[in-house]
Image: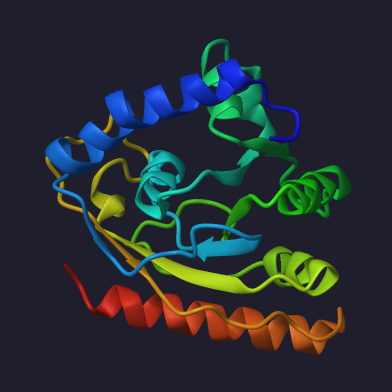
């Protein structure tokens, strides 16, 4: 359980089943295709279009997923406690954040799944245009497989510039097949594996609802 207390895990599952899962199923008519392995370390890589993506994806994963979240969110009272409880850890945008990489490696060492949005920030159409290499780097350093996941429809929940989320926007989560990690941290290999992940996510997106 790492740094989490027993009471934290109780709160995590209560939040999931009393809040997040009803939102996913009843408010957003959520569908899930595919499944993640229920145990063992893995890196979940996904597209990103809404602030609600992390809890919705973690809910569909059927296991706790530790997500990188921009450090500014950890300065907001209450929100900080909620996202920390849900396994989030801060990352500094605009460069290599070694503390965030270390936190991801520690989560993997505890058997958690680690979630990383390949484009680093939200996109307007849900597609990945400029993927970062951080997920492939962590996968290479820890020899952990990557699982591509496509979040379809979340760009309609809360696109960039919209202050409040839109309800009753149907979403679908599609989970792909694991992709082996790079055999080394050479940039060319990181780029190749990242490209495979992006292609897999885009193919899943094209499946639609």
Q: Is residue 192 left or right of residue 204?
A: right
Out of 73 and 130, give the one closest to the viewer: 73
**In this picture, is 73 found above or below 47?**
above
Residue 107: % across, % down: 72, 47
Q: Determine whether 117 is above or below 167 in the image.
A: below
> What's the colour scheme?
rainbow
Q: Is residue 128 visible?
A: no
For residue 22, which quarter of the picture?
Answer: top left
Question: Which residue is located at x 77 percent, y 88 percent?
Answer: 189
Residue visible at 75% across and 83% down in the picture: 182
Residue 86: image x %, image y %?
Answer: 53, 32
Quadrant (top left/top right/bottom left/bottom right) for the C terminus? bottom left
Q: Is residue 127 left or right of residue 168?
A: right
Residue 76 seen in the current view: yes
Q: Nearer the viewer, residue 135 or 12?
A: 12
Place residue 165 in its image quadrant: top left
Most extreme residue toward the top is 77
- Residue 17 lies, with reference to residue 30, above or below; the image says above
The one nearer the camera, 78 or 181, is 181
Quadrant where the image shows the N terminus: top right
Relative height, residue 93 to residue 142 (above, below): above
Q: Position of residue 147 (x, y in %)?
A: 53, 71
**Residue 63 x/y as whole percent:** 48, 48
């Amino acid at each position: 359980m790492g740094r989490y207390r027993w009471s934290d895990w109780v709160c995590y599952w209560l939040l999931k089943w009393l809040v997040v899962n009803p939102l996913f199923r009843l408010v957003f008519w959520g569908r899930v295709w595919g499944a993640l392995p229920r145990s063992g370390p893995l890196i979940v890589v996904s597209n990103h279009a809404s602030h609600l993506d992390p809890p919705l994806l973690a809910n569909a994963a059927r296991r706790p997923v530790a997500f990188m979240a921009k450090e500014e969110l950890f300065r907001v009272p209450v929100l900080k406690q909620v996202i920390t409880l849900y396994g989030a850890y801060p990352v500094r945008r605009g460069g290599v954040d070694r503390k965030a990489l270390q936190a991801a490696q520690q989560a993997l060492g505890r058997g958690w799944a680690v979630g990383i949005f390949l484009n680093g920030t939200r996109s307007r159409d849900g597609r990945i245009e400029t993927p970062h290499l951080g997920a492939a780097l962590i996968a290479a350093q820890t020899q952990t497989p990557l699982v591509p996941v496509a979040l379809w429809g979340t760009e309609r929940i809360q696109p960039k510039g919209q202050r409040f989320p839109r309800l009753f926007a149907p979403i679908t989560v599609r989970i792909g097949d694991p992709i082996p990690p790079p055999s080394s941290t050479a940039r060319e290999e990181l780029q190749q594996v990242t490209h495979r992940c992006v292609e897999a996510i885009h193919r899943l997106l094209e499946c639609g609802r």
